[in-house]
Amino acid sequence: KIRGFIFDLDGVIVDTAKYHYLAWKKLANELGFEFTPEQNERFKGVSRRRCLEILLEIGNITATQAQFDRWMVGKNEDYLAYVKNMDESEILPDVLKVLNFLKERKIPTALGSASKNAKVILEKVGLLPYFDVLVDGNSVTKAKPDPQVFLIGARQMGVDPANCVVFEDALAGIQAANNAGMVSIGIGDKELLGEADYNFRDFTEIDSDFLTRLISG
Ligand code: G6P
Ligand code: MG
């Protein structure tokens, strides 16, 4: 019986990967190398710090601590310039349908994201009121596939992990949900997210029958 619903943010609720990509590409280009959309796939669900480490490996660049920190800040400033222009039109299809289903039934919801910008993004797209609990990159010390982010979410919702479901678009996120002992739902490429308990292309494929079955167990 599912009693709490946990959502990843980037790639599940909004498609911010395109903005992360543009900001990382700008930095790569400034440092004199290319960064492709395919390479950006590896950045999904990965912390900002780890992304920069991978980017510098791709460019074969060694940095001083001061340079590293400056590039982290610069990338985030560029990213936030895109975020500033976001509005509710960027909510992915039928996400609101699912959130309203849960709200009408007063079922606890949590956001479980690696992003330190999660709150401002939810504010921009008007979804902050839909979440009872926010767990983001500011409150976790261990990255997905470690279950920490989702376990904190469950605890703050007051729901046993075994009674939680997680929506995720990244393999590390599905693994984190599985490691937490939760029901995992892959949103996106089924080939990539085969470890999930359920797979859907996007929320348009999730109907109220499926949600009703989850909550009535
Ligand atoms: C999400 C995205 C990643 C991003 C990470 C950190 O997990 O999928 O691509 O690197 O959040 O985001 P932040 O907003 O803190 O830089
Ligand atoms: Mg994601």
Image: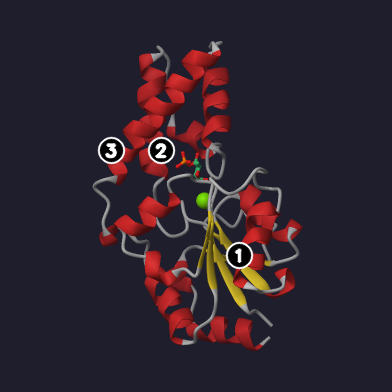
Quarter of the figure with the N terminus: bottom right
Residue 87 left/right relative to 153: left
Q: Mark 1 and mark 3 in contact (Cβ < 8 Å)?
A: no
Ligand 1 within 8 Å of the CB at mark 2: yes
For discs 3 and 1, the disc positioned in front in the rendered view: 3
Q: Residue at x 44, y 29 (%)?
A: 36
CA distance separating discs 2 and 3: 11 Å
Q: Relative to 137, say whether 56 is above or below.
A: above
Percent position of residue 77, x then y: 34, 32
Q: How crowded is mark 2: few (under 14 residues within 10 Å), some or many (20 or more)?
A: many
CA distance separating discs 3 and 1: 29 Å
Q: Can residue 194 be seen in this view?
A: no
Residue 123 left/right relative to 109: left
Please report whichever mark, 3 or 1, sits nearer to the chain's N-terminal start.
3
The residue that label 3 is drawn on is: 81
Q: How crowded is mark 3: few (under 14 residues within 10 Å), some or many (20 or more)?
A: few
Please report whichever mark, 2 or 3, sits nearer to the chain's N-terminal start.
2
Please report whichever mark, 1 or 2, sits nearer to the chain's N-terminal start.
2
**Which corner quadrant of the image does residue 189 belong to?**
bottom right
Residue 20: give its label.
2
Q: Relative to 81, say whether 106 is above or below.
A: below
Mark 3 secondary-structure assignment: helix
Mark 1 secondary-structure assignment: strand
Percent position of residue 203, x then y: 46, 69
Percent position of residue 81, x then y: 28, 38
Q: Which amino acid does label 3 sit on?
A: Ala
Q: Relative to 58, say whether 3 is above or below.
A: below
Mark 2 secondary-structure assignment: helix
Q: What residue type is labelled 2?
A: His
Ligand 1 within 8 Å of the CB at mark 3: no
